[in-house]
Image (tube, rainbow, N blue to C red):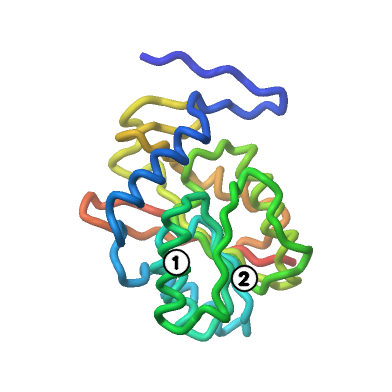
């Protein structure tokens, strides 16, 4: 049984895996298999688009865009979208698909590590979307910092919609424990969320909805969280 990892000065648990190792793992995964997650938009993206349209959103930010299946869907729906990811191959795929579909003018893709300050001015976006980015190798402290950054770049009333695997997921507590709710499975680190973590990570936002759903053949069990900036 693994020992608990050391505590950081800020009180968060330090995952025993480097971000560089995870970046390399994802780079290999996205390079080896085109459209690794399929070509159709995810169900959470389809639902979020309806919420964004009802809210009158136009400028969107997507975190952890992967190979762009949701990015392209949002562009097709008429949104202007800026996608962030830290995989070069994923970003290249997004740019190529956007250009081929004629969405280049309203689609931007930038390499970025979400543990760093977001490269945008305050109030740059109407909404933010991320499918499974929040449950990557991010500690609770890093999630709080990321949420604060998302809040900063959203305009008043802006929506932040994200998904994350839950502690009722069949993979929870499998693999090697990396601290907190972090487990390494097949080389990928997953942070499993309970409702307490959802509420703590929502600091400074109004929680609009916390829904549960299933995805994939395992199936994965996830939260879909909708937050609104005051």
Q: Nearer the viewer, residue 48 or 33?
A: 33
Q: What residue appears at the point 42 percent right and 54 percent down from the top-left corner? A: 89
Q: Earlier in the sequence, mark 2 or mark 1?
A: 1
Q: What residue appears at the point 28 percent right and 42 percent down from the top-left corner? A: 170
The kind of secondary structure element at disc 1 is helix
Q: Which residue does the numbered mark 2 point to in the structure image?
A: 127
Q: Are marks 2 and 1 in contact (CB under 8 Å)?
A: no
**Which quarter of the figure has residue 35?**
bottom left
Query: Position of 114 compared to 224: left or right?
Result: right
The kind of secondary structure element at disc 2 is strand
The image position of residue 201, as x and y in percent, is: 62, 48
Q: What residue appears at the point 31 percent right and 31 percent down from the top-left corner? A: 174
Residue 226 appears in the rendering: no
The image position of residue 137, as x and y in percent, is: 49, 38
Q: Which residue does the numbered mark 1 point to in the structure image?
A: 94
* Label number found at residue 56: none
The image position of residue 65, as x and y in percent, is: 47, 60
Query: Position of 54 compared to 165: left or right?
Result: right
Mark 1, Cα crowd under 10 Å, few <14 / some 14-19 / many 20+, is: many
Give me the C-alpha separation between circle 2 and circle 1: 20 Å
**Which quarter of the figure has residue 92?**
bottom left
The image position of residue 154, as x and y in percent, is: 71, 66
Mark 2, Cα crowd under 10 Å, few <14 / some 14-19 / many 20+, is: many
Q: Nearer the viewer, residue 196 or 104?
A: 104
Residue 194 appears in the rendering: yes
Compared to residue 17, the image places residue 82 above or below, namely below
Compared to residue 127, the image places residue 197 above or below, namely above
Q: What residue appears at the point 56 percent right and 59 percent down from the top-left corner? A: 84
Q: Nearer the viewer, residue 179 or 64?
A: 64
């Amino acid at each position: 049984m693994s020992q608990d990892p050391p505590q950081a000065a800020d009180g968060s648990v330090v995952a025993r895996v480097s971000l560089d190792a995870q970046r390399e793992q994802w780079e290999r995964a996205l390079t080896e298999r085109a459209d690794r997650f399929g070509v159709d938009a995810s169900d959470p993206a389809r639902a979020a688009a309806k919420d964004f349209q009802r809210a009158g959103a136009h400028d969107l930010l997507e975190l952890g865009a992967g190979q762009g299946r949701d990015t392209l869907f949002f562009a097709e729906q008429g949104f202007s979208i800026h996608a962030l990811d830290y995989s070069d191959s994923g970003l290249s795929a997004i740019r190529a698909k956007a250009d081929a579909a004629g969405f280049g003018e309203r689609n931007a893709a930038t390499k970025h590590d979400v543990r760093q300050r977001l490269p945008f001015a305050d109030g740059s976006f109407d909404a933010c979307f991320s499918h499974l980015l929040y449950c990557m190798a991010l500690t609770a402290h890093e999630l709080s910092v990321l949420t604060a950054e998302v809040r900063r770049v959203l305009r008043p009333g802006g929506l932040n919609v994200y998904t994350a695997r839950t502690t009722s997921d069949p993979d929870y507590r499998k693999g090697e424990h990396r601290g907190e709710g972090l487990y390494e499975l097949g080389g990928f680190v997953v942070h499993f969320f309970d409702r307490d973590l959802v509420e703590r990570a929502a600091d400074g936002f109004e929680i609009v909805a916390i829904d549960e759903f299933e995805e994939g053949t395992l199936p994965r069990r996830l939260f879909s969280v909708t937050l609104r900036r005051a």
